[in-house]
Image (cartoon, grey):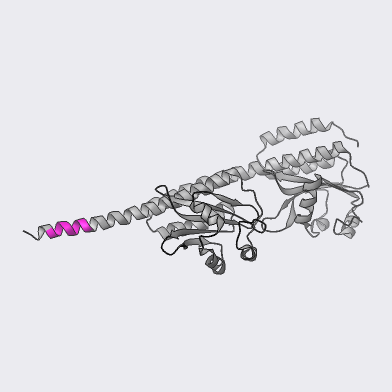
C-alpha cells in the first residue's frame, strides 16, 4: 500500500470538511474520491438501499463507466447479512467470485479485486461503500479499518442530512396541523388530512386512525391513507397484542412484521407490502380513545425523534377530537339554553 499521507491525517482532513460542509452529496463524493486517491483504487462507489426494495443504488461514485453503472443493482438482503456477520467483504478475484454478479461486466470494466464495508445510519446498515482495484490484491487490516471509518463518516453525513430535513418538514407540518385544527371543526377532514400529511412528511407507506367502540368491542376506522380496503377490513379487532397494549397507553414498535410473534396477520402484512409498524394510543383528557397505526415498507429501527413526533401526532389527533367534541357539547347546551329561555318568555 503506497499512500501520500498517513490514514489518520487523511481522516482528520475529511472530518474538518464534514464539520463545515452541509451538503450531503458533496460529502459523499469526498469520501469516494478519498478512497480512490489514498487506497490505490481504480474506482469507488457508495450505495444506499432504495426505500421499499431489496436493492442498493449508487449515490456517489468515481472511476466507473456509465455502462458499468447500469449493471444490475446489488441485492441487499444477502450482502447485508454477510456484512453484519463479518464486518467487511473482500473479493480477491471479482471476475470469478460466486458471491458476485456480472463477472463479464467486471472484466470489461477492468476490475480485479473489491473491498466492501457497510454504511450504517443510526446503527442500521443502510448501504455499502466499495473500493475497486485494477490489479488483484489482498487487503490489509489497516486498509479495511480506514474504509470502515470513511463509511461511518458517510453514515454520519446521511444521518445529519436526514435529521435536518426531518426537522424542517416536521416544523412546517406541525404549523399546518395547528392551523388546520384551529380553523376547522370537521373532525373527519382534519384526521383525513393528518394521515395524508404523515405519509408525506415521515415517509410512511400508510397510516390509519381508529377509535374505540366499546359497545361493539371493535375499532372504528375514522381516517386512513395508503392502505387497501381489504387490509383495513381485517384491522377492526382489539384483541391483537399490539392494539391491546396501545389501548393500555403504550407505544408499540414492530421492526419486522414478518417475524414478530405479536403480529397476528403476517400474510396480510406481507401482501400489503408492510415490513415494520408503530402503534400508538390516542388520548383525550387522559383517556385512551383509540389508536394510530403507522406502517412502513422498509425494515427500520425508527429513530427516537420520529417516535417522539409520532406520539405528538397522536396527541394532536386526540386534541382535535376533543375540541370538536367540546364544540358539539357547547352547541347542544346553547340550543337547550335558548329553548329554556324561550319557554320562560312564553309565560308572560
- Location of residue 28 by image quarter: top right
State the quadrant of the N terminus: top right
- At which x and y percent is residue 104? 90, 60
Query: Is 314 or 24 nearer to us in this picture?
Result: 314
- Residue 145 visible (yes or no): yes
- At which x and y percent is residue 47? 75, 50
Query: Is 56 or 294 nearer to us in this picture?
Result: 294
From which residue to which does the magenta span run?
Answer: 336-343
- Location of residue 103 by image quarter: bottom right
Residue 257 falls left or right of residue 35: left
Q: Is residue 14 above or below residue 172?
A: above
Q: Is residue 273 above or below residue 83?
A: below
Q: Which residue is drawn at 92% across and 43% down?
A: 138
Residue 91 falls left or right of residue 245: right
Q: Which residue is drawn at 55% across and 52% down?
A: 201
List the single residue furthest toward the right.
Answer: 136
Q: Is the magenta stretch mostly helix, strand or loop?
A: helix
Q: Does the magenta stretch include residue 339?
A: yes
Q: Does the magenta stretch include residue 301?
A: no
Amino acid at each position: 500500500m503506497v499512500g501520500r499521507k498517513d490514514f489518520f491525517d487523511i481522516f482528520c482532513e475529511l472530518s474538518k470538511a464534514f464539520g463545515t460542509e452541509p451538503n450531503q452529496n458533496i460529502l459523499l463524493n469526498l469520501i469516494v474520491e478519498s478512497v480512490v486517491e489514498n487506497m490505490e483504487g481504480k474506482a469507488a462507489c457508495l450505495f444506499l438501499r432504495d426505500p421499499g426494495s431489496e436493492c442498493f443504488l449508487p449515490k456517489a461514485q468515481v472511476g466507473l463507466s456509465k455502462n458499468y453503472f447500469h449493471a444490475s443493482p446489488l441485492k441487499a438482503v444477502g450482502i447485508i447479512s454477510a456484512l453484519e456477520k463479518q464486518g467487511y467483504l473482500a473479493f480477491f478475484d471479482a471476475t470469478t467470485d460466486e458471491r458476485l454478479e456480472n463477472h463479464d461486466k467486471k472484466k470489461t470494466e477492468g476490475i480485479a479485486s473489491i473491498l466492501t464495508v457497510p454504511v450504517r445510519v443510526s446503527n442500521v446498515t443502510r448501504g455499502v461503500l466499495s473500493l475497486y482495484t485494477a490489479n488483484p490484491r489482498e487487503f490489509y487490516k489497516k486498509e479495511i479499518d480506514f474504509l470502515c471509518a470513511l463509511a461511518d463518516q458517510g453514515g454520519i453525513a446521511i444521518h445529519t442530512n436526514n435529521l435536518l430535513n426531518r426537522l424542517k418538514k416536521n416544523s412546517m407540518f406541525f404549523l399546518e396541523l395547528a392551523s388546520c385544527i384551529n380553523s376547522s371543526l370537521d373532525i373527519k377532514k382534519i384526521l383525513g388530512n393528518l394521515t395524508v400529511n404523515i405519509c408525506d412528511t415521515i415517509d410512511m407507506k400508510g397510516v390509519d386512525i381508529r377509535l374505540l367502540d366499546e359497545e361493539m368491542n371493535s375499532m372504528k376506522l375514522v381516517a386512513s391513507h395508503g392502505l387497501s380496503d381489504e387490509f383495513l377490513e381485517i384491522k377492526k379487532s382489539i384483541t391483537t397484542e399490539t392494539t391491546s397494549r396501545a389501548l393500555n397507553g403504550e407505544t408499540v414498535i414492530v421492526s419486522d412484521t414478518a417475524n414478530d410473534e405479536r403480529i397476528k396477520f403476517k400474510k396480510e402484512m406481507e401482501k400489503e407490502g408492510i415490513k415494520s409498524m408503530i402503534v400508538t394510543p390516542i388520548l383525550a383528557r387522559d383517556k385512551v380513545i383509540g389508536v394510530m397505526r403507522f406502517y412502513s415498507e422498509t425494515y427500520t429501527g425508527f429513530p427516537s425523534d420520529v417516535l417522539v413526533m409520532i406520539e405528538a401526532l397522536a396527541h394532536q389527533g386526540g386534541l382535535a377530537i376533543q375540541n370538536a367534541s367540546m364544540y358539539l357539547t357547547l352547541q347542544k347546551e346553547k340550543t337547550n339554553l335558548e329553548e329554556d329561555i324561550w319557554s320562560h318568555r312564553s309565560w308572560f
